[in-house]
Amino acid sequence: MTTKLLLAAAAALALSAGVAEAKPGRHITAAVADKARPEADTRRDADRKPAEMLEFAGVKAGQKVADFIPGGGYFTRIFAKAVGPKGTVYAITNTPPANAATPPPILAIAADPAYGNIKLVQTGIGSFTLPEPVDVFWTSQNYHDLYLTRFNLDVPAVDKAIFNAVKPGGVLVVLDHAASAGAPVAETANTLHRIDPAAVRRNLEAAGFRYEGESRALANTADDHTKGVFDPALRGHTDQFIYKFRKPK
């Protein structure tokens, strides 16, 4: 009887722990609730589920996080608040062209005292190095960009640079728009801005990462994968995969 009671108690404890782990931590919910975030970002929260994404990535206070190709800084701001003043967020981007009509938004975000723990890394997405290894390396809706003709990148070399940027035991999370299974990677990247999830997994396992799992939080079975991600009928609601990889210790 005692053994049965112990087993039942252990099962109940495991179940309660699992439920607790599924809920974003307070540091994450507070980061998403940050009043300094622009309305243009907060309006997208229902579709992008940032709290669930950071919880899946395992972002914790005090960590070092890399945001690869941060775009408008949607996740960069949230990372900065989630890791807090003892943490650092490295925003990895290309050097803006001298004749750019509008500076990339990430420059203003990194200059904002409210986000003083964001550090710019502008050595280029194809040849970057970080000042220190990171706990979490994040790339959102842009891994497929590595295959864009205009960048002319050596993708395996970029994958290896990402691997080298992550500390042993750290994680890489790739979130992107899903293409049809087996679809030619370069073709779908350049025409639809999508990529076959299986190709991403092959690439990153070849670079040395171990696949750890996926989140289906942004899956959309109504997406037939044949439309471009900017199609008005689909924009903001594509079928997106979120894969987590870990660097072996």
Image: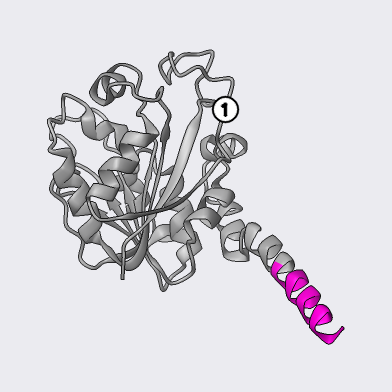
What type is the residue that disc 1 sits on?
Asn
The residue segment tinted magenta is 1-14
Vertical placement of 26 versus 124: above or below?
A: below
SS state under label 1: loop
Extreme residue toward the right, this view: 1
Residue lying at 63% horizontally and 63% vertically, measured from the top left: 21
- Residue 105 visible in the displayed image: no
Task: Report whether 71 appears left or right of 80.
Answer: left
Residue 65 falls inside the magenta stretch: no
Residue lying at 26% horizontally and 66% vertically, measured from the top left: 133
Q: Can you give x and y, in whole percent of width and height, for residue 143 in the image?
A: 31, 37
- The residue lying toward the viewer, choosing from 126 and 155, is 155
Residue lying at 13% horizontally and 48% vertically, measured from the top left: 127
Q: Can you give x and y, in whole percent of width and height, for residue 128 in the image?
A: 16, 52
- Residue 56 visible in the displayed image: yes
Q: Quadrant of the C terminus?
A: bottom left
Q: Quadrant of residue 165?
A: bottom left
Q: Residues within 10 Å of mark 1 (few under 14, many from 20)?
A: some
Residue 6 falls inside the magenta stretch: yes
Extreme residue toward the bottom, this view: 2
| Residue under pointer 1 | 220
Residue lying at 16% horizontally and 31% vertically, measured from the top left: 151
Vertical placement of 203 versus 22: above or below?
A: above
Q: Can you give x and y, in whole percent of width and height, for residue 163 in the image?
A: 24, 56
Task: Report whether 239 appears left or right of 118.
Answer: right
Task: Report whether 131 appears left or right of 68.
Answer: left
Task: Report whether 41 appears left or right of 25.
Answer: left
